[in-house]
Amino acid sequence: MRQALGKETVDRVRATLLSTPQEFRAEWLAGQNKVVVPFEPPLKLSAEFAGRICAAFATGGSGIAWGVSSGTWEGMRPHDGVVVDLASDEVTAWHDEFMPFDMVLVTPDLSRAALFGQDEVGLVAGPAAVVETFLGTSLEAARRAFVEYAADMSAASRHLPGIAARYGCT
């Protein structure tokens, strides 16, 4: 069983990072040369994607991240926040355990984070090199890919083209 984060830590992460359960705070994004890129959140993490997440988040020198639900929901299992070892199988297990909730994976220094939203959009934020490692491509290619995804999904998810525009993808 993963080590649970205390309520104060979970509340601090949410207050610092999130303006809504599916959006980062502008004030947090403005600090430490961060870029933010939207992405299509997978229902299941591939081993390759989980490996990229670990590589991106471990560049800060920590071997752990914090996995936090974006909000508190009745019956959350097992905790609103847990310590996640930065190993592909551990990140995948955390992701599977927190589904279907909106969730954030963040480094303990709060310098980089990924929001896995259940509304067909994810966001990754941090230094440009971290975001590129996480997404496995250049910022420009990732933004183009999100624009294509948003266009493909626009009939069912009309909000996606607006998200692409908000985050400079168009």
Image (cartoon, helix red, strand yellow):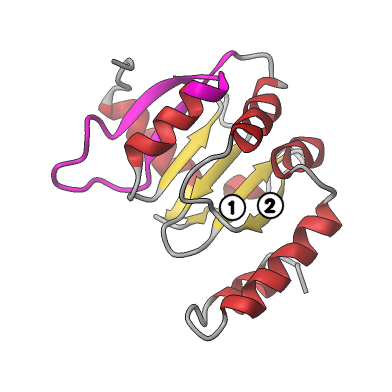
Vertical position of residue 86 compared to residue 159: above or below: above
Residue 163 at x, y = what percent?
60, 71
Give the magenta range: 63-89
Question: Element at badge 1?
Answer: strand
Q: Please tell me which residue is depicted at 33% across the width and 50% down the height of the picture.
A: 100
Quarter of the image with the N terminus in it: top left
Residue 22 at x, y = what percent?
45, 57
Q: Are marks 1 and 2 in contact (CB under 8 Å)?
A: yes
- Residue wearing tag 2: 36
Tell me if 19 is positioned left or right of 39 in this view. Answer: left
Please check the rendered image and state whether residue 70 is part of the magenta-colored stretch, yes or no. yes
Q: Residues within 10 Å of mark 2 (few under 14, many from 20)?
A: many
Please check the rendered image and state whether residue 55 is part of the magenta-colored stretch, yes or no. no
Q: Please tell me which residue is depicted at 63% across the width and 56% down the height of the picture.
A: 39
Which image quarter: residue 52?
Answer: top right
User: What's under tag 2, amino acid-wise?
Assistant: Val
- Residue wearing tag 1: 123
Q: Residues within 10 Å of mark 1 (few under 14, many from 20)?
A: many
